[in-house]
Amino acid sequence: MPVDSKKLVKKASQLMKPVEKLDCETPRSTTTDGETITFEYMWATHLSDEDFEWVYALFKANMLDMYQKSQWGYDENSKRNELRATTSRFIIAINSKGEKIGYTTYRFVVDHNIPVAYCWELQILPAYQNKGIGSMMLDTLERLSARTNMAKVMATVFLYNAPSLGFFHKHGYVSDVTCPSDDSGLDYAILSKETPS
């Protein structure tokens, strides 16, 4: 892999508070129904046990059925380790009552020799879906990708997860060059959006 990609990812991964330090937070903070949302940013390793259990419970509530019918299957230990990996970073959405209502977890990685910000999960409580919160978190991640010189933001989405596919397509994400072909028989797509230079 090119040295530049590896160095860029290493530098971005070592930033203690990248969103705050690089001033990447989305300027939008109000849901479509007028509620003000705030955000917290942290490394997965800094989540309290209570917060991590909330993260995992929301993932499981939203995604268990999809994982159980996927070719990957569902492996709780593997998913817990993935969410709590030392390279994982969180953007956590908080409602006007101070309650956690959603999160995205991302990593800076080298993917096919290219430095990328990879959106690992984007999970929101059902009552808060379709109110613009996912868009706010994705906007922050895209801004962060640009300020850390990542080439693009990527996400992997199940082909049968129509709401998620629609969400990413609405925000300008397209099939990545690494996306499995339609005739591959695989049940997921790899999407990406280039970071503006």
Image (cartoon, rainbow, N blue to C red):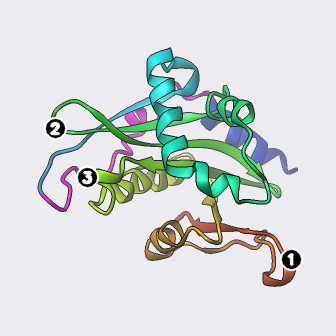
Q: Main secondary structure of the magenta part?
A: loop
Identify which amino acid the numbered label 1 is placed on: Ser
Find numbered disc 1 in the image and state the secondary structure of the residue it sits on: helix
**Residue name at image x 88 percent, y 50 percent:** 1
Q: Between residue 166 and residue 27, name the one nearer to us.
A: 166
What residue would you read off at disc 2?
96
Q: Which residues are magenta?
A: 14-33
| The C terminus lies in quadrant | bottom right
Instruction: State the image coordinates of residue 113 (x, y, percent, origin top left).
Output: 82, 55
- Compute the Cα span from label 2 to label 3: 17 Å
What residue would you read off at disc 3?
27
Identify which amino acid the numbered label 2 is placed on: Ser
Residue 89, compared with residue 177, is above or below; it is above
Residue 197, compared with residue 102, is above or below; it is below
Asked whether 82 falls inside the magenta stretch, the response is no
Instruction: State the image coordinates of residue 106 (x, y, percent, origin top left).
Output: 57, 43
What residue would you read off at disc 1?
184
